[in-house]
Image: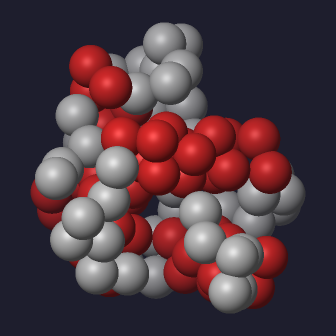
Amino acid sequence: MKYQKSEMVYTDYKWTAKADQDNPKYIGGQDAAMLNREEGYEMLYFINSLATTWSWTNATLSSFNNLERIIRTEVPSNIRTHGGIKNWIEKQYAGKGI
Protein backbone atom coordinates (compact mmCIF):
# COMPACT_ATOMS: atom_id res chain seq x y z
CA MET A 1 0.00 0.00 0.00
CA LYS A 2 1.22 3.48 -0.83
CA TYR A 3 0.06 6.42 1.22
CA GLN A 4 -1.98 8.82 -0.89
CA LYS A 5 -2.57 12.57 -0.67
CA SER A 6 -6.30 12.00 -0.09
CA GLU A 7 -5.53 9.82 2.96
CA MET A 8 -3.33 12.32 4.79
CA VAL A 9 -4.41 13.47 8.25
CA TYR A 10 -3.46 17.13 7.94
CA THR A 11 -5.02 19.38 5.31
CA ASP A 12 -2.84 22.47 5.76
CA TYR A 13 0.05 21.35 3.54
CA LYS A 14 1.45 23.44 0.71
CA TRP A 15 1.68 21.46 -2.52
CA THR A 16 4.36 23.47 -4.28
CA ALA A 17 7.66 21.59 -4.65
CA LYS A 18 9.32 24.51 -6.47
CA ALA A 19 12.82 23.81 -7.73
CA ASP A 20 14.25 20.44 -8.72
CA GLN A 21 16.31 20.31 -5.54
CA ASP A 22 13.09 20.68 -3.54
CA ASN A 23 11.22 18.09 -5.58
CA PRO A 24 11.13 14.77 -3.69
CA LYS A 25 11.61 12.84 -6.94
CA TYR A 26 15.06 14.44 -7.22
CA ILE A 27 16.16 14.35 -3.60
CA GLY A 28 15.19 10.71 -3.31
CA GLY A 29 15.13 10.45 0.46
CA GLN A 30 18.79 11.27 1.02
CA ASP A 31 19.67 11.14 4.71
CA ALA A 32 21.15 14.67 4.68
CA ALA A 33 18.21 16.22 2.82
CA MET A 34 16.06 18.57 4.87
CA LEU A 35 12.37 17.76 5.22
CA ASN A 36 9.91 20.62 4.96
CA ARG A 37 7.06 19.36 7.16
CA GLU A 38 4.68 21.90 5.65
CA GLU A 39 5.23 20.71 2.06
CA GLY A 40 2.76 17.96 1.19
CA TYR A 41 4.78 16.37 -1.61
CA GLU A 42 7.84 16.08 0.60
CA MET A 43 5.89 14.60 3.51
CA LEU A 44 4.05 12.13 1.30
CA TYR A 45 7.24 11.00 -0.41
CA PHE A 46 9.13 10.73 2.90
CA ILE A 47 6.37 8.71 4.59
CA ASN A 48 6.25 6.28 1.65
CA SER A 49 10.05 6.12 1.63
CA LEU A 50 10.10 5.18 5.33
CA ALA A 51 7.42 2.54 4.74
CA THR A 52 9.60 1.00 2.03
CA THR A 53 12.75 1.20 4.16
CA TRP A 54 10.95 -0.47 7.07
CA SER A 55 9.37 -3.12 4.79
CA TRP A 56 5.78 -2.14 5.55
CA THR A 57 4.31 -4.61 3.08
CA ASN A 58 1.01 -4.99 4.93
CA ALA A 59 0.76 -1.55 6.52
CA THR A 60 -2.67 -0.20 7.36
CA LEU A 61 -3.96 3.29 6.73
CA SER A 62 -3.86 3.79 10.49
CA SER A 63 -0.09 3.11 10.51
CA PHE A 64 0.51 5.68 7.78
CA ASN A 65 -1.71 8.24 9.54
CA ASN A 66 0.13 7.65 12.81
CA LEU A 67 3.53 8.05 11.14
CA GLU A 68 2.39 11.34 9.60
CA ARG A 69 1.18 12.54 13.01
CA ILE A 70 4.47 11.53 14.67
CA ILE A 71 6.51 13.45 12.10
CA ARG A 72 4.32 16.54 12.40
CA THR A 73 3.79 16.67 16.16
CA GLU A 74 6.33 14.54 18.03
CA VAL A 75 9.67 14.78 16.25
CA PRO A 76 11.45 17.83 17.70
CA SER A 77 11.51 20.77 15.28
CA ASN A 78 15.31 21.05 15.48
CA ILE A 79 15.61 17.60 13.86
CA ARG A 80 15.15 18.41 10.19
CA THR A 81 17.05 15.93 8.03
CA HIS A 82 15.52 12.76 6.62
CA GLY A 83 18.14 10.69 8.43
CA GLY A 84 17.69 12.54 11.72
CA ILE A 85 13.91 12.18 11.66
CA LYS A 86 14.15 8.49 10.73
CA ASN A 87 16.67 7.84 13.53
CA TRP A 88 14.56 9.72 16.10
CA ILE A 89 11.46 7.70 15.24
CA GLU A 90 13.39 4.43 15.33
CA LYS A 91 14.79 5.24 18.79
CA GLN A 92 11.47 6.40 20.24
CA TYR A 93 9.40 3.55 18.83
CA ALA A 94 11.90 0.67 18.95
CA GLY A 95 9.97 -2.48 19.77
CA LYS A 96 6.70 -0.56 20.19
CA GLY A 97 5.49 -0.35 16.61
CA ILE A 98 3.95 2.67 15.01
Furthest residue toward top:
11
* Residue 31 in the image, given as x and y percentages of width and height: 46, 82
Q: Quadrant of the C terminus?
A: bottom right
State which quadrant residue 72 falls in.
top right
Judge from the rendering whether residue 64 lies leftward or rightward of residue 84; answer left or right: left
> In this rendering, is residue 62 above or below 29?
above
* Residue 87 in the image, given as x and y percentages of width and height: 64, 83
Picture residue at 77% right of the left edge, 57% below the top = 75
Q: Is residue 22 at least partly visible in the picture?
A: no
Judge from the rendering whether residue 50 lies leftward or rightward of residue 81; answer left or right: left
Picture residue at 75% right of the left edge, 66% below the top = 79
Picture residue at 50% right of the left edge, 24% below the top = 9
Q: How many marks?
A: 0
* Residue 55 in the image, given as x and y percentages of width and height: 28, 81
> In this rendering, is residue 47 above or below 52?
above
Q: Residue 80 versus residue 89: which sits nearer the camera?
A: 89
State which quadrant residue 94 falls in.
bottom right
Q: Is residue 66 at least partly visible in the picture?
A: yes
Q: Residue 39 versus residue 50: which sits nearer the camera?
A: 50
